[in-house]
Image: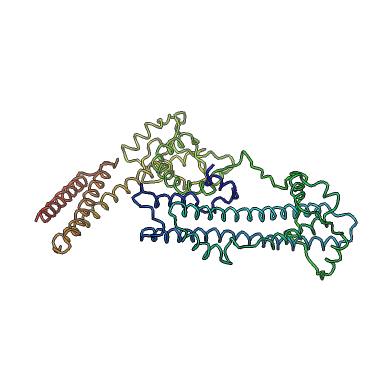
């Protein structure tokens, strides 16, 4: 097995990202010291310039690899030291609280807290041993790389130079001593094991028990621990979640001291802001669809509405609500039948008969007096199908006609403004920036033509019959815009050829 594959196993697998690039360094050396790569192997005792240059580059790369690993080892050792300090404070605080409580039996929460601290402390010990193993693997990898270089080049200059300047430096990670961390860990673990109750020690998880078996068992009496802790000054403390929070279930529900996360299968797993983002884009589309389909919706709503109108104010008791149009079965005061709704509607439309006058006469009939005299059919709308009035539909149609009318002449106005700007640029353009001016004029002409076409389309989309004078003005304006823009475009093309 090659050492490149063995190196990953000898090091810590979860920290493999921080290993030195052994395979890359080995390949780099092989490429620059092989005849097949157009680089001659240096003759022993005669070091050429190419080999010297390559040796300097390799030395710089080894220094960078060393600094990267050294940074990781230093940060990891500092992290373990901070964790040990934090656990030491927590453990001594818990021991002091147990000593000053005066209870014969330790509460369940404190027992579980002792077990939790012990597991965290054992994990710190595992990290210390893993860090020592990681450092040893990096040292072996550096030695292998230097040995490969000496074997393929016959030069020992790089090895001695790197060992003297880098590996032998007192601040190098290869000279780092982890005995202080190990001693702090051992002392804290002995103190914690001495303070743990006997019944709790018998119920520890198998993983914790196997880790305990690796350590030397030194018995410390609980009385000595209490006396040492009693020397500290006791201060008044208040309850807080960090120190006194409930941690029930660490050992009873899960033997490994881990937590289980419950995931609701029916919960919404979409992006939290996706609904708001979708609403932001779908609201304009919904409003546009509502504006387009308003005609059909209003017609359906009128057909499903009541035949008799409803008023906001209540009618007097015994009075009959006035309808908007007489029915076929109604009769006049003289006894003659009243014409049907269709006939009346047609007569009103032909004679210009206003519904308000009919309502005024109808309201004077006996027995049909309404409690409100102002709720007449509004003026300005056609009275067809008066039993099912289409006021909303007609109002929407009028609004649409106004939008199309003003949109038509607005587009024509903007088109002529752009055409005027293009004409000014054509007349006053200079030779220095002729290309930019011609591009701007061409863009203005095309935009002006597009607006003129849009205006013509809006004029043709109007459902209301327009007078012949209006139609002639629309078509004449469109023709003028097309001819003028065409002339400007011809002038621009003529200037471009010159």
Residue 253: image x %, image y %? Answer: 75, 44
Q: Return the residue found at the far left.
A: 498
Number of numbered callouts drawn: 0
Q: Is residue 14 visible?
A: yes
Q: Is residue 65 left or right of residue 220?
A: left
Residue closest to the eye, 35 or 237: 35
Q: Return the residue found at the far bottom.
A: 233
| Coloring basis for residues | rainbow
* Residue in the picture at 77% in, 49% down: 213
* Residue in the picture at 55% in, 58% down: 69
Residue closest to the eye, 146 or 451: 146
Q: Return the residue found at the far right.
A: 104
Q: Is residue 43 above or below residue 307?
A: below
Q: Quadrant of the C terminus?
A: bottom left
* Residue in the picture at 63% in, 60% down: 77
Image quadrant assignment for residue 129 = bottom right
Residue closest to the eye, 162 or 80: 162
Q: Quadrant of the N terminus?
A: top right
Q: Is residue 424 visible?
A: no
Q: Is residue 3 left or right of residue 343?
A: right
Residue 367: image x %, image y %? Answer: 52, 38
Q: Is residue 160 above or below residue 392?
A: below
Q: Is residue 91 left or right of residue 7?
A: right
Q: Return the residue found at the far front.
A: 45
Residue 202: image x %, image y %? Answer: 83, 47
Q: Is residue 113 above or below residue 270?
A: below
Image quadrant assignment for residue 355 = top left
Residue 403: image x %, image y %? Answer: 32, 48
Residue closest to the eye, 108 or 289: 108
Q: Is residue 93 left or right of residue 462?
A: right
């Amino acid at each position: 097995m090659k050492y490149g594959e063995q190196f990953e196993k000898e090091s810590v697998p979860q920290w493999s990202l921080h290993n030195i690039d052994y395979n890359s360094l080995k390949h780099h050396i092989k490429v620059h010291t092989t005849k097949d790569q157009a680089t001659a192997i240096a003759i022993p005792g005669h070091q050429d310039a190419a080999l010297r240059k390559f040796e300097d580059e390799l030395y710089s790369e080894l220094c960078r690899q060393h600094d990267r690993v050294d940074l990781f080892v230093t940060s990891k050792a500092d992290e373990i030291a901070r964790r040990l300090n934090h656990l030491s404070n927590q453990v001594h605080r818990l021991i002091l609280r147990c000593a000053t409580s005066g209870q014969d039996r330790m509460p369940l929460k404190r027992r579980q807290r002792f077990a939790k601290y012990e597991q965290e402390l054992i994990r710190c010990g595992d990290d210390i041993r893993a860090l020592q193993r990681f450092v040893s693997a990096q040292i072996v990898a550096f030695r292998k790389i230097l040995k490969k270089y000496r074997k393929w080049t016959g030069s020992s200059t790089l090895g001695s130079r790197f060992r003297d300047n880098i590996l032998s430096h007192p601040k190098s990670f290869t000279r780092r001593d982890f005995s202080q961390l190990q001693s702090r860990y051992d002392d804290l673990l002995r103190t914690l094991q001495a303070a743990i109750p006997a019944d709790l020690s018998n119920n520890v998880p198998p993983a914790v028990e196997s880790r305990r078996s690796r350590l030397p068992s030194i018995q410390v009496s609980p009385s000595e621990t209490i006396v040492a802790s009693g020397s500290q000054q006791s201060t008044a403390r208040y309850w807080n979640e960090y120190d006194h929070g409930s941690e029930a279930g660490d050992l009873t529900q899960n033997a490994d001291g881990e937590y289980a996360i419950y995931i609701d299968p029916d919960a919404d797993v979409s992006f939290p802001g996706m609904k708001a983002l979708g609403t932001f884009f779908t609201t304009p589309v919904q409003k546009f669809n509502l504006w387009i389909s308003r005609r059909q919706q209003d017609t359906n709503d009128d057909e499903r509405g009541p035949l008799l109108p409803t008023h906001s104010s209540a009618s007097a008791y015994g009075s009959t609500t006035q309808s908007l149009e007489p029915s076929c079965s109604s009769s006049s005061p003289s006894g003659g039948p009243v014409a049907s709704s269709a006939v009346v509607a047609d007569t009103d439309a032909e004679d210009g008969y206003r519904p308000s006058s009919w309502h005024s006469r109808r309201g004077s009939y006996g027995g049909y007096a309404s409690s409100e005299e102002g709720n007449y059919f509004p003026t300005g709308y056609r009275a067809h199908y008066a039993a099912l009035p289409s006021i909303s539909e007609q109002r929407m149609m009028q609004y649409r006609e106004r939008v199309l009318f003003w949109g038509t002449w607005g587009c024509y106005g903007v088109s002529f403004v752009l055409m005027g700007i293009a004409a000014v640029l054509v007349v006053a353009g200079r030779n220095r920036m002729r290309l930019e001016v011609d591009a701007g004029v061409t863009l203005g002409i095309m935009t002006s033509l597009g607006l003129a076409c849009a205006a013509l389309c809006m004029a043709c989309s109007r459902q209301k019959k327009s007078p012949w004078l209006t139609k002639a003005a629309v078509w004449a304006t469109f023709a003028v815009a097309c001819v003028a823009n065409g002339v400007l475009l011809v002038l621009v093309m003529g200037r471009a050829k010159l």
